[in-house]
Image (cartoon, helix red, strand yellow):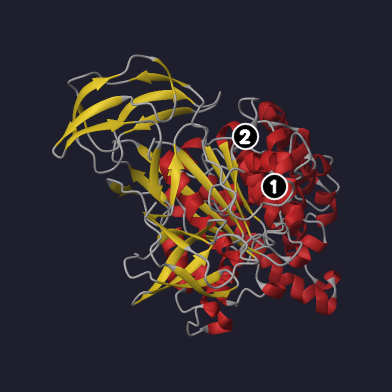
Amino acid sequence: MMPVGNSLVSGVSGPTVTAIGMAEAQMYEVVEVGELGLIGEVVRLLGDRATIQVYEDTTMLKPGAPVRRTGAPLSVWLGPGLLGGIYDGIQRPLPGLLAHSDAWIRPGEKIDPLDLRKKWNFTPLLRAGDTLSAGQMLGEVAETGLVKHLVMAPPGLTGVIRSVVAQGAYTLEDSLAVVTTAAGPRELRMLQKWPVRVARPIRERLRITEPLLTGQRIIDALFPLGKGGTAVIPGGFGTGKTITQHQLAKWSDAEIILFIGCGERGNEMTEVLRDFPELQDPRSGRPLMERTILIANTSNMPVAAREVSIYTGINLAEYYRDMGKSVAVLADSTSRWAEALRELAARLEEMPAEEGFPASLPTRLAQFYERAGAVTTLGGARGSISIVGAVSPPGGDFAEPVTQHTRRFTRCFWALDTELANARHYPSIHWLHSYSEYVEDVSAWWEQKAPGYRALRNETLALLQREERLQQIIKLVGPDVLPDSQRLIVFIADLLKDGFLTQNAFDEKDMFCSPERQVALLRLILTLYRRGKELIEAGTPLAKLRSLTSVPRLLRAKSTFSDAQMDGLAQLERELAKELDELAHAQAHGPGSQA
């Protein structure tokens, strides 16, 4: 802690505090404000006067209170024990705070983010005399039953290992190795600290080549997200943004899940905090929290901590990415984060831009989303961070600034539709308003995993677009005026919506769908369309196609056959083909046909 000197509070405006006697302070330096030691960060300097952004409740704070400098930026603690943790925006563990207080966090309360007394079984991977470079793995720790934690040399360190401990149990602050560097000997420990506003360095960015599989058909098959990519989920109130992100957290094939509840309603975040510890990882059967970190900063918590919670989360994600792991960051919602920026900018008397947001909003959004990507780490491993940010535009207006600027920096847009949500069509992602720019990047992966994917996807979207145009005619003059060839398109589109695009999160067979089953379901529906189109051109009425016994079974196939029952889908496809063949034969040899 730096000496107090004459640093005193001179003014208080909500979470923004001005202080005098701060001539030696630095930008983004952490300070402790008042007798309770409220955590704050210097965000403006003018002479000996500093503006401080306080991350705690400033009630009862008054001019004349002392300000203590720390000489360091706001930093996150990194090491074993993060997984399974629930933190607030400045990485204070909420379960630990609850044990020391009541339901409300007391101002100035401080608890270490990680348990410094707990011992972890460390296994060294290098020996004395080996060269250690930045990002290289010194050893490993079994952090949970699902994740092996790799202890890495911090960025900027290169040298020769003078000594390293034997395999055994050590605390986070125990010295594990001594490295001889150009600046002299340096001890390495499990515990590391990193400034929250500084991105961790990488060796190079890589091209995205595989999708982040979510098990949600409309996402994986139609609007895929690349592993290491960025996506946005905009939607009005009640359209299912939070539920969609919960599904992604549970079913995506990322190794680490980091959920940031940024400014959401307390009851929604409470549901997350209660449900996640009880969820099982569907692939291993172990608790999902063994590979999950939750950051909770609800709408009634200090607004400044909401602003920094995004950076806290992305730093933790980069730490696990540097171990060579794939990480999914789910931010709910970036609109509340942008609102925090707007409030803080207003208190700093910055010039407002559109709708009162600060002019720096696009830059701040870009800085966040550009920390995603597939990379080669400093240690030479391949890691990735995929970011999915929810946006809550007022009134569902996608033209508002946060949604529009976010679209500029993301390549995947899953637009939630209020009408679909009201019709209980979930996920309520609208197929005509959404898009993905990762289709070309992941097509090779899909074609290898499920041949025929690209053609089926294109045909599906074309059918849905044609059906939308036909619906305009139907609203004007009714469906009976359409020829059977066009009514077939409407019929197949209905099958796609009910038999493929909707997905029941509570159905054991339907809640997750593998890539192979997704393509098989699409092939079934489009086979009916292709063959039906030929039959209708030959004179077969649409009513006969609709009356095939395979049609209702096709509609129920998504919840009838699980991923382990692909043979059942193949059998249904054969039965459908047989019925269509019989219909074609009857048409060719029926009354009026020529011998």
Question: Relative to residue 227, is residue 352 depicted above or below?
Answer: below
The answer to whether 21 appears left or right of 34 in the picture is: left
The residue closer to the viewer here, 246 or 231, is 246
* Viewer can see residue 491: yes
Label 1 Cα neighbours within 10 Å, binned few <14 / some 14-19 / many ≥20: many
> Quick one: label 1 or label 2, which is nearer the N terminus?
2
Judged from the image, the secondary structure of the residue bearing numbered disc 2 is helix
Q: Position of residue 218 (x, y in %)?
A: 64, 51
| Residue displayed at 74% across by 65% down | 237
User: Looking at the rendering, in which quadrant would you find the C terminus?
Assistant: top right
- Amino acid carrying label 2: it is Met
| Residue displayed at 79% across by 54% down | 540
Judged from the image, the secondary structure of the residue bearing numbered disc 1 is helix
Q: Position of residue 242 (x, y in %)?
A: 69, 54
Question: Relative to residue 241, is residue 79 depicted above or below?
Answer: above
Looking at the rendered image, the disc whose residue lies closer to the viewer, 1 or 2, is 2
Q: How many marks?
A: 2
The answer to whether 181 appears left or right of 88 in the picture is: left
To which quarter of the image does residue 156 belong? top left
The residue closer to the viewer here, 65 or 590, is 65
Label 2 Cα neighbours within 10 Å, binned few <14 / some 14-19 / many ≥20: many
The residue closer to the viewer here, 67 or 520, is 67
* Viewer can see residue 535: no
The residue closer to the viewer here, 238 or 26, is 26
Q: Position of residue 224 (x, y in %)?
A: 54, 51
Distance CA(mark 1)–CA(mark 2): 38 Å
To which quarter of the image does residue 279 belong? top right
Check disc 2 and report the residue beneath it.
289
Check disc 1 and report the residue beneath it.
525
- Amino acid carrying label 1: it is Ile
Q: Position of residue 10 (x, y in %)?
A: 50, 75
